[in-house]
Amino acid sequence: MKTYKRLLTYAGSLSGFLIPYFFVTVLVSVFSLANFGLAIPLLDMLFTSEESFKVNGVLLELKNFDGSIEFLKDYFYQEFGLLMNENGKLYALMMICLVTVGASLLTNIMRYVEKMIAENFRVNTISHLRTSVFKKVLTLDIGYLTDKKKSDIIARSTTDMTETENSLASVITFIKDPVALIIFFVSLIMLSYQMTLFVFLILPISGGMIALISKSLRKKTHSLQEKNGELLGVLDESIVGMRVVKGFNAEPYVNKAFKKHNDDYVNTFFKVVRRIELASPTSEVLGVFFIGVLLYYGGVLVLGEDPTLSASQFLAYLGIFTQVLNPVKSLTGNISRIQRGVAATERIFELIDTKPEIVNKADAKELKSFEKNIELEDVRFSYGDKEVIHGINFSIEKGQTVALVGGSGGGKSTIADFIPRFYDVQKGAVKIDGLNIKDYTLSSLRSHMGVVTQESILFNDTVYSNIAFGMDSITEEDVIKAAKIANAHDFIMALEDGYQTVIGDRGSRLSGGQRQRLSIARAVVSNPDILILDEATSALDTESEKLVQDAIQHLMKGRTSLVIAHRLSTIMEADKIVVINKGKIVEEGTHKELIAKEGGEYRKLQELQGYDR
């Protein structure tokens, strides 16, 4: 229960829930009990002589109540006897019926209030938990999100969250059902301690059998959640990569992969379901068996030579006992749901407990302004045991444009990711104005930077919201100005609703060049001191590349820029070009200096792209 104890910390004020919920639960049980208690005088009035309602000379008063059920029985019989004497038997019968209807009405009103309190508690708890999960995802390192399957994180945030929400409702029954059981069992003991003692002897059999069924459920449920995450992963990848799937006629291949994961999920699901569904019929059969045994034993007490129970009391006892069975079945049936919830909640807490590796130092400073330069000093980095960045050294002076060029997989993007601390170097240092960037707070460091990547990251929102993303203080005038600088204003105004046009999932309603120009406009409006361009034009056609390149030139004016270039024609005017090969710097200089080197790496790259000296 340690998992649920932690889950309840997301509920806010527990006392604010428990006190009213406990109070209303007690009222529900009391009014339910009154319904069956009123059946005793009703049955006696209908089927026995009026001797039962004979009024004695000395009247009983409620202030003399001694806590016994006999007193309550004698008092109500006395009151109904008085009604019969004054108004006749039918009037007394009508009053019993009215009181019964009233008790039923109050029972259902309280039951409704009870459910509303429980639902409010459950929904708010899950809302707080869901918010915590999303906040955690936002703090996770780029490296973690790259290593982990996106589908697994989504599964923990959705499917597991739903499982936890359902199981929380079952946990609440462990507050409600024991209260009802205590009240009902006290009443049963007062009616007949012999029958109740017999019930206590046979009920544990049901609990033991349900416990055996649920024993292995938790482990199987944990496996089921993992299978569901894998299934979501295949579905997500197939939808995102549908152009490739159709382009390569790979539908049969993808379908086969999905079927395999789906079959694994179904097989695991049925293993879980077999255990879950076995609990309900087992408790149902046991319940009928117990009722049969009670009917016989109660008949002995009523019809024996020395009866200890009247027929009306026996029928009322059976009615109350049926109410006992419901919470007992609920408790035993909820064990399986709680076990499933534990497995799902543990997966959620695994995500919440993930510690980001890139965090602020305790004494981190604010980077208030960028004044001098960016320096990379003997920077090294490894993926696992394999070092991929080997002793990188170069600097970018304020106002300079430095380009990183080289073959794919050489480490250019990784080097660029060190500056905004998307990754942390493992050896060496990245410095801004002479101070290690780890000594600055992450938010202040990144507030001076703008990033434009090869893949335009846009959101299913309006053009305006995508440009002004994350910047509440930006005005409409700022957005339009940024769009004009990015060569985006004209095509935006040609859209159906201009700047208020919703651009679809990942900007799907726009062309590649339009998406990239929106990304550039977003960088313009943030007005960064340091600009990182990661192959921002490599995926575009010639016409779009020219428009985007013009926009980039506008963006780079007066800024310190690090440019990763695939098309070398775009960086000939850079102040410095750093050639990277297999994680090492092999050449460094201006375009003219590097192109003049016979057999140089940069010159080879230029010749491969058709450069004419």
Image: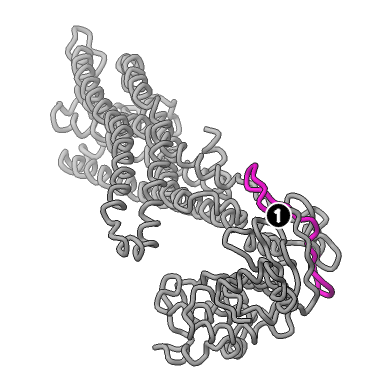
Image coordinates for residue 127, horizontal then vertical, percent: 50, 55
Q: Nearer the viewer, residue 298 or 415?
A: 415
Task: Say which quadrant the C terminus sits in.
Answer: bottom right
176 or 147: nearer the viewer: 147
Which range of residues does the magenta coloring cover? 366-389
The answer to which of 113 and 193 lies nearer the viewer is 113
Give 580 or 554, whichever is nearer the viewer. 580
Residue at figure coordinates x 62%, y 87% from the top left? 478
Would you say the magenta stretch is mainly helix, strand or loop?
strand
Q: As shown in the figure, which amino acid type bears the numbered disc 1?
A: Asp
Magenta stretch contains residue 562: no
Where is mark 1, residue-wise?
Answer: 424
Residue 523 image offset from top left, x and y in percent: 62, 78
Is 207 above or below relative to 132? above
Residue at left 27%, top 33%?
277
In the displayed structure, does residue 14 sit left or right of residue 96? right
What residue sits 23% from the left and 34% below the top? 39
